[in-house]
Each structure stands twice: as C-alpha cells, then as structure tokens.
Amino acid sequence: MSATTKAPPVSAPAQQAPRSDQPTTAEGRPSQAPLPGLYETILVERRERVGLITLNRPKSLNALNTTMSREVMTALCAFDADANVGAVVIAGSPRAFAAGADIAEMADKTFAGLQADDVFAAWQGMPAIAKPIVAAVSGYALGGGCELAMMCDFIIAADDAHFGQPEIKLGILPGIGGTQRLTRSVGKALAMDLILTGRSIDAAEAKAAGLVARVVPAAELLQTALEAAHTIAGYNAPAVRMAKEAVGRAHEVSLAEGLLHERRLFQAAFATDGQKEGMHAFLGKRAPVFRHR
C-alpha cells in the first residue's frame, strides 16, 4: 500500500488468538508459539499491513486487569513477529480508551502478594516491540489507561479524550510508568500537578503539553489512526524499525551517544533493498514499491 492510500474501512476477519495463559518470559513476551483460542478481553484484526487491537471490557470501561495485560502483550508480540504487519493500532471504545487499572482485582492485594504475582510485569515487554504502535484514544485514558497510551509510540486523540493519573485519590501512585513517562512527555511541573492532585486534562491541553500528537473529531479517530498506521506500514520496514529505535534511544542516552547511534542506523539503512528502491524511485520520479527487506 502506498503512503497516500486510505485505510480500508472494512476489516479482515478477526484472527484466532492465543489464550491468556500463554507462558511468557520475564519481559512479558511469549516463551513459545501462541496457543490457539479466543481472547477474552480484546478484539484482534489485521487490516492489510496494520494490526488492530481493540480493548474490549465495556462494562468496566476497559479497566486493565491481569488477563487484558497478558492478552495485549501476546497480541503485540504476534503482530511483531508477523512479516505481513508493519504497524499496530491500539484502540478502546468511544466512552473510554481505558479508565484505569482494575481496582476490584487489586483492592485486597498485599505488598508481598504484588511482589510474588507482579500484575504489571507483562507490560515490561512493550518497549521491546520493534514495530510502531499508535494509540487511538477517545473518552477516558486515566491511570493505567493513560500509561498504556504513553507506552505506545504516539497518541492520536479524539477531541473528547481526557488524560490523567488519579491514583493518588485511591491512596496509591502510578505503577506502570506514569511517573516516568508522563514527566518525560510533559515536563516536571505538569506531571507533578497531574500526579499529586489527581486532576485530568482534555485533549487540547494534552496536545499543547506534548503528550498527544494529533487531536481529531471523535467520529474520525479510528480511521485517522488506521491511516497513520497504513502510511507507516507502507514504508521500508527495516528503516521504520531503525527510526523507531533511534527516537526511543533519545530518552535513554546522552545527545552525543544518541547522535552516534542514529548515524550508525542511518548507515545500516543503506544495506536494505528499500534504500535502493526509495532513492532510485525518487530519481526516476515514480512511487517506490517497498518489499520490506
């Protein structure tokens, strides 16, 4: 699909999916081939070269429980390993992307119990997903929902979206990276404000603060996110992976080390067929046809 092709409005049939009891490594990635079965808490589709994961616990406003955490990670890993997928979209429902973690599941947990059965450990594998992940956020993205959106590579928000880390109202604090990723996204002052007061911000303020990449009308959200993912998936896949890696490295290392890493990845891109195709297509004044190798 070319970079300008619109995302298809009709989805491919939902795929068979791994069970939530799929064994995982310490990083939360599947330790063996996925087992057949149906997901309990998410819907999974492939739309041409884009994987779509839809959070599907409507009665709890898509609250993140242990099963959903494992299922989202299992689906992401499956898409990451699929050569026919170039990017992934994670979406919720119109009312809520995810309204937080599942409080009913956590209310009676103890310190020792949480250490022994770390319900959030499954998310540790998400930064290792090589393919770009777009969050399509409408309604509430609070607590764990906001943290899941921030774990994606960028957020496209509906104009009715709200973001926040209200855990302080429950006597706790964020536990899936909220204090770290929010601070890196919006700066110390706003992160402290949101985390310590528990207030939320709307999509416009989130975009102004740098948390959100785009704000669109709610009716256009999913199509916009899918179009962005289809654009990404249409480019030279090795270069896309390298670009994501380079941007991710910017948060982890010094500027000098990041520049060196970027330069090495730039040079490595010249070992791909896509570099030759892209540059020769430009010189030939034609659209490139990337074969993702």
Image (spheres, rainbow, N blue to C red):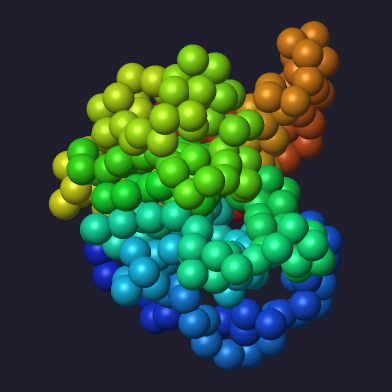
**Which residue sits at x=49%, y=64%?**
102
Residues 95 and 171: in front is 171
One can see residue 210 in this view? yes
Is 127 above or below relative to 58? above
* Residue 131 as seen in the image, left or right of residue 41: right
The percent position of residue 61, horizontal first and vertical second, equals: 34, 64
Q: Which residue lies furthest to the top in this view?
A: 256
Q: Nearer the viewer, residue 38 or 283?
A: 38
Residue 16, above or below 163: below
For the point 32% across and 71% down, the residue is 58
On the picture, is 138 further left or further right than 279?
A: left
Q: Where is residue 50 in the image (x, y as percent from the top left)?
A: 46, 59
Say which residue appears at 58% left-offset and 24% top-offset: 184
Tell which residue pokes out farthest to the bottom in this image: 37
Q: Foreground: 116 or 269? A: 116
Seen in the image, is 141 located left or right of residue 189? left
Evaluate whether residue 235 shows in this view: no
On the image, the x and y values in percent for residue 210 come to: 42, 23
Q: Residue at x 27, y 33 (%)?
A: 202
Q: Quadrant of residue 245?
A: top right
Residue 115 percent coordinates (x, y)? 79, 60
The answer to which image quadrant residue 70 occupies is bottom right
